[in-house]
Each structure stands twice: as structure tokens, then as C-alpha cells.
Amino acid sequence: MTKKKEQRNQKREVNTLKKLRMARDGYILISFIFYISGIIYMVMSSLSPLAVCICSGIILILYGIVKIIGYCSNDLYNLAFQYDFACGVFLIVVGIITLGCNLRIRKYLTPALGLLILLDAVLKLQTAKDAKVFGLRTWNRILIFSIIAGIFGVLIIIKPFQSMQTTHIVNGCGLLAEGIMNHLTVKETVKLSNISVQPHANENDANE
């Protein structure tokens, strides 16, 4: 009975680790999508409005799915994914609306982008605070990039620049900042859960 219980525990821990890796890899993938989107936005000033709407809708839906996977991944410290279920559902709904309405809501996409970046940055500020409580030494990096992303979010919303080229650069930098912020957060916080699972696996190996 004890051996079967240990095997069940080990299997549960392995499944948890797989979910965490899936969530982490999904976040990293989305981060790279933000990198690419930011660069394209800065380099290509004339983009098809329909293509922008369709790509935005798809990215929002994918981002929402990744967030829900992260929330369901049973992260031990629950730092990177603590607000992700509600955010994920919201992003999926907004993504579906964007795909369905596309050109009719195009003028709202830019301020909506700024609002989403700002909201995500504010939530990551809370993550940085919690990471500090847990003793994570790199909490200040998460804090710094959250502030930077939040600043770009505000700039995208208020759109203080008259030049369209400058606006495109700011929007692109906002996407880059969002990608870096998410990439750094998941890289620095989720690995704590990976470490916590490993000792149990080693104990089971030793018992066998």
C-alpha cells in the first residue's frame, strides 16, 4: 500500500510539473509573439486594418487560453498565475469580439491595447510584491519592467504624440515591454515550483 501511495504521489507530482512546463512554455511563446508584433508595428507603418484586427483577435484568444492553463497548473506559490483565470476569460471574450466585429471596432484597438498592458502591469506589481515576500531575489526586476510596461500602457491610451511614426514606435515598445514583463515573470517565479517538485521525485527514486 505504501509503495502504491508513493507511486500515485509521484505520478501526481509529475503531472503537476508537466502542467507547469506547459503553462511556462505557453507564456514564453506568447512573449515572443509580443516581441514579433512589437517589431512589426515599429517597422511597418502601413498595416492592413483587417489584418491587424484578425491578428489581434487571434493573439488575444491565445493569450487568454495560456492564462487559463497557467491558472489551472497548480503552481505551488501561485505567483505568476494568481489572477489568470478571470483575465484569461476576459481576453478570450475580447478576442472573439475583435474577430467578429473587426473593422467596426478598429479605432478602439489602440486604447484597448494600452488598457490591457496597463492592467497587466498593475497585476505584475502585485506579483513583484508577493515575490519579495516569498524571498525571490529578482522581485525588483519584475517591479521595474512592470513600471516600464505601465508607463507605455498609459502613453498608448492618452496618445500624446502628433506624429504617427512616433505613435507606432510607442505602441511597438509597449508590446515589447509586455512581452519582456511576462517572459521575466514566468521565468523567475515558475521555476520555484519546479524545484519544489524535484526533491519528492528524488525521494521516491531512492525508495525504489
Image: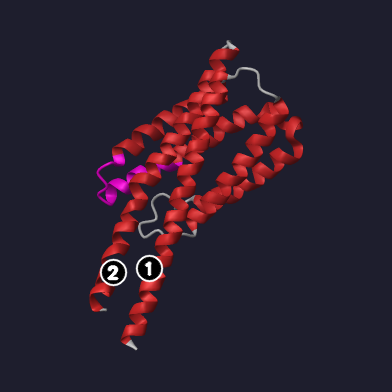
Q: Residue at x 47, y 53 (%)?
A: 23
Mark 2 or 1 closer to N-term?
Answer: 1
> Residue 44 in magenta?
no
User: x, y (%) of residue 68?
Assistant: 54, 54
In the image, residue 50 above or below residue 79: above
Q: What is the chief secondary structure element of the magenta stretch?
A: helix
Q: Amino acid at mark 2?
A: His
The span picked out in magenta is 123-139
Circle 2: element type: helix
How many labels, in total? 2
In the image, residue 28 above or below residue 44: below
Q: 169 or 207: which is nearer to us?
A: 207
Q: Residue at x 55, y 33 (%)?
A: 115
Q: Residue at x 65, y 42 (%)?
A: 94
The disc at residue 64 is none
Q: Amino acid at mark 1?
A: Glu
- Check disc 2 and report the residue beneath it: 200
Circle 1: element type: helix
Quadrant in which the C terminus is drawn: bottom left
User: Looking at the image, can residue 180 be seen?
Assistant: yes
> Residue 132 in magenta?
yes
Q: 169 or 26: which is nearer to us?
A: 26
The answer to whether the residue labelled 2 contacts the one labelled 1, judged by CB atoms less than 8 Å apart, is yes
User: x, y (%) of residue 13?
Assistant: 38, 68
- Check disc 1 and report the residue beneath it: 13
Q: Is 24 left, or right, of 99 in this rendering?
A: left
Mark 2 crowdedness (10 Å alpha carbons): few <14, some 14-19, many ≥20: some
User: Looking at the image, can residue 74 be seen?
Assistant: no
